[in-house]
Every structure is written in structure tokens, then in C-alpha cells.
Amino acid sequence: GEGGHHDMETLPVEKRVAFMSGHVEAGLALFRAGAPDQAAQHLLHPVSETHASERAGIDALGFEPAVFEAVSKALEEGRPAAELEPQLKKAEANMALMQEKAGGDTKIIIEYLMGTVVDEYGVGVQDGKVTDPGEFQDAFGFSVVAMKMAKRLDDPKAADLNRELKALVAMWPAGGPLADSTPKPVAEVAAQTSKVLLALSALP
């Protein structure tokens, strides 16, 4: 999602990395679900010129554009996801490394991601249909990033948070956030993000 509600230049680097990671997660899920055409825009996101402002300062965090360029080239060549799994794993690892190096308060980042999920899902789903697949898919990606971040908190008190985030991710079809999915109602997804925020607020 690239609505005017993302002013990337002013966003702290850890939030920008989380945002970028969401696109990558969406792309990986779609590629693995056998929809490379839908995956492309998401996986190209980190190296796309359109999103250059997002990348300000992330090279210092160990961003490896070559990894994403290799994936996008393979997409263009129509190579299957199974053959590309090593590169996909590298892309995941690179995003995880950057998240780690970007630092920041995980709770604040998860809170930011939940707001973004609600925004993007609300744009992506209208009248019970997926009307903007990119936004529907981004919202999924941001949910996955939040879930992975919560796991890394490694705090016994985060059990509720982990459970609510897992439930949020499960609101998209198990086969991936494909464009032709039958989406859950916007209100249900928003309600689930509220449960996540409630669990988040219970953490010390």
C-alpha cells in the first residue's frame, strides 16, 4: 500500500524496515502459493525506485539489494518457487537482520503495524470482496511481521500476544492472501487487531 498515509521520509527507520518487511512477507507467501504474478510487486518493493525514500538509511543495516534483484529476475523468468527457496530464505533472513539492526521498541512497532493493517485492509476489502489485492496482501504481510516480532520478544508474558497475532494471520486463507480470496469482514479484522493491542498493552 502506498497511500498518502505513509510519509516514509519522516518514519523512523525501524518502522520503515517493518513496512518493507511486510511487503516481502506478502510476496513470499504469494510466490509460495503459486502466484508469482501477484508476488512480483511485493517482492520488488525493496529494490523499486518508486520506494527509494523508504530505503534511506537502511543500507547501513545490511540491506542486500542483490538478494531481491535475484528473486525478481527469477520471477521474470517464471522459475518456480520451489527452485528458488534458497533465495527466498535469503530474502527473509536479510529482512530479519535489518529488523534486528534497526532496533526500536518492538511494542511500538507492532502497534504501528496494527494501525497499518487496519488501514490497508479497509482499502483492500470493500463490500465483502477483495477490491484492491495489493492492500489486502500488504495487510497480511504486516500481520506476519508483527507475529514474527512478537515471537522474538521471547517473554513468557507475551503468550497472549502471540496467540492473538496468530489468530490475526489466520484471518487470511491458509493457502496465502490470493487476490481471489473470500475475505473476512473488515470489522472482524479490525476487532482482532484490537485484541492484539490489548494483549500488547498488558506487557511490561
Image (cartoon, rainbow, N blue to C red):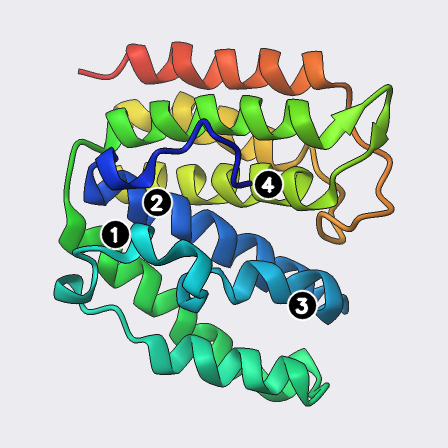
Query: Residue 76 at what x, y percent from top left?
Result: 66, 83
Along the viewing direction, whichever of 92 and 124 lies nearer the viewer: 124
Observer-nearest of 44 and 33:
44
Q: Which mark is residue 32?
A: 3
The spot of residue 112 in percent (x, y) is 36, 26
Q: Secondary structure at mark 4?
A: helix
Q: Earlier in the sequence, mark 3 or mark 1?
A: 3
> Looking at this view, is 34 or 160 the one in front?
34
Q: Which mark is residue 99?
A: 1
Left or right placement of residue 176 versus residue 144 in this view: right
How packed mark 1 is, by other alpha carbons closer than 10 Å (few <14, some 14-19, many 20 or more), is many
How far apart are labels 1 and 2 at the CA level?
7 Å
Q: Give the labeled residue for mark 4.
A: 140
- Quadrant of the image occupied by residue 167: top right
Looking at numbered disc 3 in the image, what kind of residue is underneath it? Arg
First along the sequence among labels 2 and 4: 2
Determine contact: label 1, label 2, CB under 8 Å. yes
Q: Position of residue 15 (x, y in %)?
A: 28, 39
- Local crowd at mark 3 within 10 Å, few (<14), some, or many (≥20)? some
- Mark with earlier residue (4, 1): 1
Mark 2 sits on what residue? 18
Secondary structure of residue under mark 3: helix
Query: Is the residue 91 above or below the residue 126 in the image?
Result: below
